[in-house]
Image (cartoon, helix red, strand yellow):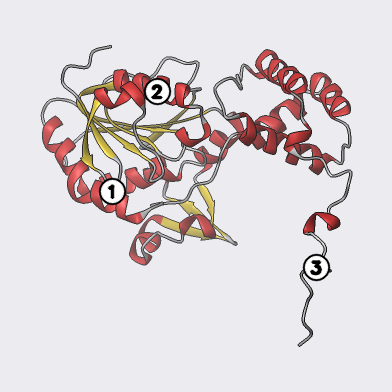
Amino acid sequence: MNDISIESAEPFSRYRDAQLFVGSDITDGAFAEIRDILFAGRGFDLDGYKDRCIKRRIAARIRTLGYRRIEDYIALLESDDVEQEQLLEALTIHVSQFFRNPSTFSVLEEKILPELLRRRRGEGEVKVWSVGCAGGEEPYSIALLFDELCGSNDQVSILGSDVSADILKKARSGIFESHRLVEVPDPVLAQYFSREGVRYRLDARICEKVRFYRHDILQDRPFTRVDLILCRNMLIYFSRQEQERILRALANALAPEGLLVLGRAETMVNESRELFTCVDPVERIYRKRDEVTP
């Protein structure tokens, strides 16, 4: 084996195309122009999102199209409705799968959902809201659990929301690639899914249990009197100020003693800690405090 001299080794940056567009190439002025175009054309407001994360995604979209200058891309974005929608798709986070973080769903199946069913039995429906539901894997996972847990008289309403109309259209189709199903137990896969080529279709009876809505958590009014909210792996893309604003909105959306589930890398910030008590610190499950009012 030949030794490699540290002194003679060249940095990896040597191999980078000098013209490759990256997030740091987007000036504040250019970012403001893109923000204004998306807000005017699609009603989507970039304020509150972490700039570095958003700039990286914009730069990736620019590289995909082969543009070298931000001015040329802004001109395209301003004149092309299709590109506005494509950029919005690139900016919104759509990473999901059925039963993502299985330990969380184990706690939901064994403790949280049975508690909610007991609480609402004979007094109305259990209402669940999946915020930022992407392709629908999360709310459909909840629907699968309820299908096993519910008695004949139990009533459940499951809502899924996302800012992207296109991704919600895919969610409603109930068709998924196999890598989205890696955490689905084989008996569940056999009972509730049918194979169609390289993809799988979820049973229509389960799909009908979930209603999907286009919803921007920063701009639109939240749903109300919700018993359980799942808002996982979304807060990390927002500034701390907007995280607190979102958490307060979610607290107001919850029914008394309602429960909130965050992602493993997320936690309460600043004054939002006063809105909830922790039920499960490992799975990031919180209960709304009784004294919190809208």
Mark number, residue 244:
2
Residue at the disc numbered 3: 7
Instruction: Indicate the amino acid at tag 2.
Output: Glu
Q: Name the residue: 56% across, 38% down.
A: 93
Answer with left or right where residue 290 lies relative to residue 59. Answer: left
Label located before the other in sequence (1 or 2): 2
Q: Is residue 170 in sight in this rendering? A: yes
Residue at the disc numbered 1: 282
Instruction: Indicate the amino acid at tag 3.
Output: Glu
Label located before the other in sequence (1 or 3): 3
**Picture coordinates of residue 229 (x, y %)?**
32, 32
On the image, which quarter does residue 249 sit in?
top left
Q: Nearer the viewer, residue 152 or 128?
A: 128
On the image, which quarter does residue 142 sit in?
top left
C-alpha gap between disc 2 and disc 3: 49 Å
C-alpha gap between disc 1 and disc 2: 21 Å
Instruction: Indicate the amino acid at tag 1.
Output: Val
